[in-house]
Amino acid sequence: MKIGCPKEIKPQEFRVGMTPNAVREAVAHGHSVMVEAGAGAGSGFSDGDYAAAGATIIATAEEVFAGAEMIVKVKEPQAAERARLREGQVLFTYLHLAPDPEQTADLLASGVTAIAYETVTDDRGGLPLLAPMSEVAGRLAPQVGAWTLQKANGGRGILLGGVPGVAPAKVLVLGGGVVGTHAARVAAGMGADVTVLDRSLPRLRYLDDVFGGQFKNGFASAGATADLVAEADMVIGAVLIPGAAAPKLVTRAQLSTMKPGSAIVDVAIDQGGCFETSHATTHQDPIYTVDGILHYCVANMPGAVARTSTQALGNATLPFLLALADKGWKRACAEDRHLKNGLNTHAGQLTYAAVGQALNLPFISADAVLTN
């Protein structure tokens, strides 16, 4: 198969869809790989690294899209990239379609077979291609939140861990999944007073068993959330409904109960965000203020640590990438129900129910596509 890896063009996105090691593996399996010149520079991989691994370096993105049977990326295709996609081509990347009707419409119009990293599953009910970036984003969240709280950035001027004689910051984490767990661990490690809320009692028991007294946890009722939001110096949004839009857990009215200069870090912004007042920002301009509360809503947080993120993502995606290339998308999905769950569009049809429900669009099952 001819595999193409273009340079990411979303603002301040420094990751790349394939590492040189992934290229080497694909070439060893008999595939050809085209990498756009400079695609890996933001992650510390030179064109020479890719050439040494067996890739052909291509001057422009247009040539990569035109020549490849499968496009491997990191972020959802931007408008210019979507215009280059075609029926019969496979797109393997993060999509996050539920809050993005424009992208969804363009992918359906192109006819491309789009397989989303974030909806591929595993035997444990997890999301193995989302997990590494969730780990990175979770660990980054307290770090960027602590920076946001600094007075020079408009925050309350609070040190997350406090000092002897001065209480630490109160951090509330909404969601006890991968993002929330890593966020809580790091925030607690920085000395903050941390509480995690989740609706799953088994998950809360797990957090209590594994982390003991490192941080507190509680059941995520509307009342408990409202009370703790009012007390928090920082709130980290870490909720996820696979493939669907994130629920709005904190309303604008609740902002008025927070202390001026408090910080919100919305890690769920890729799926629309879990705060009513959230909208996506960039690394270049990451913070905005609503009613005196600072919002950090960067939609590609792991891009800030691009080398770590690219390597972590590459480790997770490689087995699926090779399966798609070795077998073709249809056989690969038919033989792996977890990869099949990643199928979001094919030949102008939407194949993921949660996206159809979120956008009020007709959809069919992935099984119906595979049996045609």
Image (tube, grey):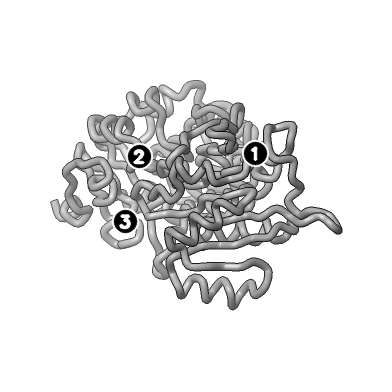
Q: Nearer the viewer, residue 245 or 1?
A: 245
> Image point 63% across, 33% down: which residue?
42
Q: Do the CB atoms of the residues marked 3 and 1 lie less than 8 Å apart?
A: no
Q: Which residue is mark 3?
A: 341
Between the C-alphas of marks 1 and 2, the distance is: 28 Å
Picture coordinates of residue 141, whole percent (x, y)? 61, 48
Instruction: Check disc 1 and give the amino acid type.
Output: Gly
Instruction: Check disc 3 and give the amino acid type.
Output: Asn
Of labels 3 and 1, earlier in sequence is 1
Q: Nearer the viewer, residue 155 or 239?
A: 155
> Image point 49% across, 55% down: which residue?
226
As drawn, 218 above or below 79: below
Q: Quadrant of residue 144?
A: top right
Picture coordinates of residue 128, whole percent (x, y)? 46, 58
Q: Which residue is mark 1?
A: 261
Picture coordinates of residue 286, whole percent (x, y)? 59, 32
Of labels 3 and 2, earlier in sequence is 2
